[in-house]
Image: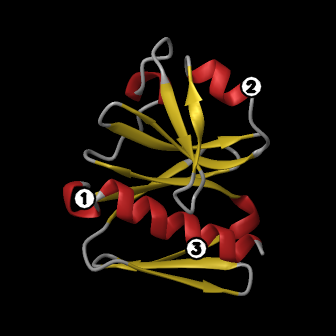
Amino acid sequence: MKRSLFLLMALLVAMLAKAVDYPYLVFTNTSGTNTVLSVSDMTLTVSGSELRVTNAEGTISFVLTELASMQFSKDGTLLALKEVLDADKPVQLFTLTGQSVGIYDNLKDAVQRNNAGVYVIKQGTKSQQIVIK
């Protein structure tokens, strides 16, 4: 189940982020370490409990249970959610299947009023995937 959810998240992120504009994919493990990889000729393969990422530079494997997130990047760095979205302005929340969950007064309200899960949060023309725990 986790593998399927992870692949679904990866596909959704790829569609929302328009990977052509983002030449890097940053993988963050549960200890907070980032691995930055070029998306040039990239393929993602799940085998057992591992995610294998192959690109023009080679192949690297990640243990799925140790992988916290992956995010496209323009320069290999990650932006915090607060830097992408204005925490005090209204936001709209969507499920990974694209169904609208609701419109909220601010980011904090959206997080507090929803169940744990993975969502896409949108504010104006900006959107980002979030995990509510």
Mark 2 or mark 1: name the one nearer the start of the chain.
Answer: 1
| Foreground tag (2 vs 1) | 2
Q: Dot 1 lies on which element?
A: loop
Residue 104, percent across and down? 58, 24
Answer with left or right where residue 98 lies relative to residue 32. left
Residue type beneath disc 2: Gln
Residue in the image at 65% along x and 44% along y: 131
Q: Residues within 10 Å of mark 3 (few under 14, many from 20)?
A: some
**Mark 3 vs 1: CB contact within 8 A:** no
Determine whether 28 is above or below 43 in the image: above
Q: CA distance from mark 2 to mark 1?
A: 33 Å
Look at mark 3 in the image and give the residue it sits on: 7
Q: Which dot marks residue 77?
A: none
Residue in the image at 49% along x and 28% along y: 91
Look at mark 2 in the image and give the residue it sits on: 112
Q: CA distance from mark 3 to mark 1?
A: 20 Å
Q: Dot 2 lies on which element?
A: helix
Look at mark 1 in the image and give the residue it sits on: 23
User: In the image shown, does 54 or 15 lie closer to the viewer?
Assistant: 15
Which residue sits furthest top? 88
Residue 87, percent across and down? 50, 16
Q: Quadrant of the N terminus?
A: bottom right
Determine whether 33 is above or below 1 in the image: above
Residue 92, percent across and down? 50, 34
Mark 3 or mark 1: name the one nearer the start of the chain.
Answer: 3
Residue type beneath disc 3: Leu
